[in-house]
Amino acid sequence: MRYRSQSIAYWYFAIAMCLFGLQLVFGLLSASKYLGPDPLLDFLPFDKTKAIHTNLLIVWVLTGFMGATYYVVPEESRSEIYSVKLAYIQLVAWTLMGVTAIVGYMFGWTAGNKMLEQPFPLKIVIVIVMLMFLYNILMTIKRAGRWTVTEGVLVAGLALAAVLYLPALIEYENYTVSIFYRWWTIHLWVEGVWEMIQGGLLAYLLIRLSGADREVMEKWLYVIVGLVFMAGILGTAHHYYWVGVPHYWLPIGGFFSALEPVALLGMAMYAYFAMRRAGFSHPNSLAVHWTIGSTVFTVFGAGLLGFAHTWPSVNKWTHGTLITAMHGHGAFYGAYAMTVLAIISYTLPHLTSDRKVEGNSIGYWAFWMQVMGMFGMTLSFGTAGIGQVYLERILGLGYLDTQLKLQVHFLMLIATASVFAIGAALFIWNFFRTAPKSVAAIDPSASAPDLAPAGHASSAGSG
Amino acid sequence: MTKRQGRLFFIICTLVSAIAFIGLTFDSHRRFPGLTNEDKLTPEIIRGKDVWHNSNCINCHTLLGEGGYYAPDLTKVTQQRGTPYLTAFLKDPSQFYSEEKHRRLMPNPKLSDTEISEVIAFLDWVGHIDNQGWPPRPIIVSGTTIPGTDVGQPPTHASVSTDPVAQGEALFRSSPPACNACHSIAPGVNLAGPTLAGLATRATAIVASPEYKGEAKTSADYIRESITHPSVYLVPGAMYSANNQSFMPDNFATDLEPRQIDSLVAYLETLK
Ligand code: HEM
Ligand SMILES: [Fe+2]
């Protein structure tokens, strides 16, 4: 770590870890309600636990992205962050917003629009916080007078994420129109600009972890983001099936969203070939696990499981069933949760004291238990979903009776979710195990054992 | 390939897709009013949408297939359940379903009478959106049509037969009217409506009984009357009616063609 202001990242990551833990509490609560009966029915019914679960996910992942940006930008632009104070004010405002939202949901204060449940005043706070963040980052880059493609893609992704949140501020009288624009936010986030963020962070990690040539890596980064947008923008149409929009969205959605996995596969190959050239020799092999793991799990959860139900003639039967939950979990975890956990794993030896770069066995347990647990969860949702499609949608059994027949899958879900939660708890414990480095103790001249970029005497500094 | 070519690829892909997407968005806006019957979007329905949002319904239910996956899809619910039924249900869901049996129960949404009628109006408006015919087969809230009876048989298509009984049977399972969303034909399996097993036999007994005050003289008359005027004779049970009004929708007299009603009667008469 070269720049003192990079230590801002620690506090963003710390908040992200707390919210991640809380997310899982509400996830497990929701899963137990699938099994039922629900002793909390009158105080904390499923709709509340589920809204809190998904909102916490979005908030902690974004917290992680912002923390990662505060870590990456100083290195790439070779400058301290423009205003450290603003970064901390931003974090406090953001955290207060998140906590208020959760408490609000518990007491029924909600806008009740899936994943955009934040009541209007909180949406405004979100916009203000995003503006503070972007201002701080852009001023840093401006002052440094230097930027790289890697950080450019990362910051552009975050800026576009803020822009795409704006349609969520508008009230639509027509429910179909409201659905139409809800996906401008949610889909164009996760299958568009968040993939830019993922790509930028991945490029950063790969350059650091493999010593791959920056020119080559950034060239392919452009290609990958190009592929993401080529398929992902028109791929929005896979959310426009059966919701009251013109019929031509059906073939468009089928065709373009079926292409989306190509970009994701591209990302995994990008990571694999970069690492293979370096012989996987970086000492922080835990970070290598998370980095490669996230691209592989993205191909599985987003690419494969998304592809599984993206064709209109399939989606006609699976739409609105647990098949969607299967894919949602695999995709969000692989692409975004794991990316944040990868960047945390990479930066943690720099941000905290008394920590070996190689990581410890708890770190590996955390990795494998989460990956296996999440794999099991997608299997549970998937098998439940297939059962549901068959019994409810094809044979015409009642919804409630079908759900009763899926009890065994819900048991499986709770079992695998528990494995996952233990893995996550280990990760969180490992994170907080040692104290953050005090800013005074940061030695700008000490260089971490990153691999030297192949063929280049020096590049944008090492962490 | 050079980095510049990579960048060019990125810019072209993004621009072309974004322009196409925005163009189609403009076109969609031209078509939304027709597809969603915007002319019927009254202030009451819009308030109903607010009730839907404020009560966070979407985090358990799905509507147009979007939402939580914890409770039934409500896209076509007003075509399967009449307003009196839905009103009574929303006042107190625990009267209709039991947590012991289904392991889940809807919490009481605590809505006022106005809010209830608004949200029902909203759901009814959603149910008439042109959404490419989804769901392909009716999604039923509860009840089982046991394997070995009619589950899994391909739906009979009315066009393959001119026999009114076959046509009636097909219609019984089609949506609309989705009779089978509320009525099973298996003995003892009561859904939102009573089972129709043995209907013709029961109908004969009802028209002959002193409690019956309607006009029907034969079992066929009675069945016809039950379809067109469900409240003339009320099947006993708080699940089926309130305030002398049946929970069965009363729109069939106008929404079905006389020929369709004839074929339904012909089919139901065979359930002896
Ligand atoms: C990182 C990438 C992705 C993430 C985070 C993600 C996440 C999600 C989530 C959370 C949902 C559920 C939305 C809801 O319940 O309303 C969803 C729905 C869906 N996703 Fe993805 N997804 C990703 C990529 C993909 C890809 C690449 C495809 C296609 C190949 C895809 C196809 C679908 C489809 C078809 C649905 C709609 C299911 C339905 O409502 O019928 N997704 N996605
Ligand atoms: Fe999507």
Image (cartoon, coloured by chain):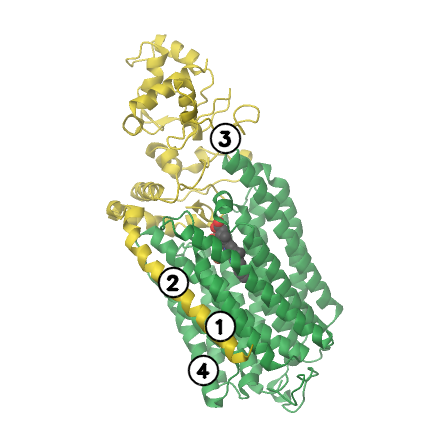
Chain colours: A green, B yellow
Nearer to us: label 2 or label 3: 2
| Quadrant assignment for the N terminus of chain B | bottom right
The amino acid on which the numbered mark 2 sits, given as a three-letter code, is Ala
Q: Is residue A182 left or right of residue A7?
A: left
Q: Position of residue A82 (x, y in %)?
A: 48, 86
Q: How many marks?
A: 4
Is residue A161 visible from the viewing direction of this image? no
> Residue under mark 2: which chain is it in?
B
Labels 4, 2: front one: 2
In this rendering, the answer to whether A129 lies above or below A39 is below
Whether discs 2 and 3 lie on one chain: the answer is yes
Q: Point out the residue furthest to the front here.
A: B1
Residue in view at x 57 percent, y 58 percent: A303
In the picture of the structure, the residue carrying the numbered disc 3 is B143
Residue at the disc numbered 4:
A138
Q: Disc 4 vs disc 2: Cβ atoms closer than 8 Å?
A: no
Name the kind of residue labelled 3 in the image.
Gly
Chain identifier of the residue bearing label 4 in the image: A
Q: Secondary structure at mark 4?
A: helix
**Local secondary structure at mark 3:** loop
> Element under label 2?
helix
Query: Mark 3 against mark 1, which lies toward the viewer?
Result: 1
**Residue that extends furthest to the top in the rendered view of this protein:** B208
Q: Provide the residue designation for mark 1.
A: B9
Q: CA distance from mark 1 to mark 2?
A: 17 Å
Find the distance from the CA under tag 3 to the CA under tag 1.
Answer: 55 Å
Are discs 4 and 1 located on one and the same chain? Answer: no
- Looking at marks 3 and 1 on the same chain, the residue that comes earlier in the sequence is marked by 1
Q: CA distance from mark 4 to mark 2?
A: 30 Å
Q: Are marks 3 and 4 on the same chain?
A: no
Residue B73, position in %: x, y?
45, 42
What amino acid is found at the position of numbered circle 1 in the picture?
Phe
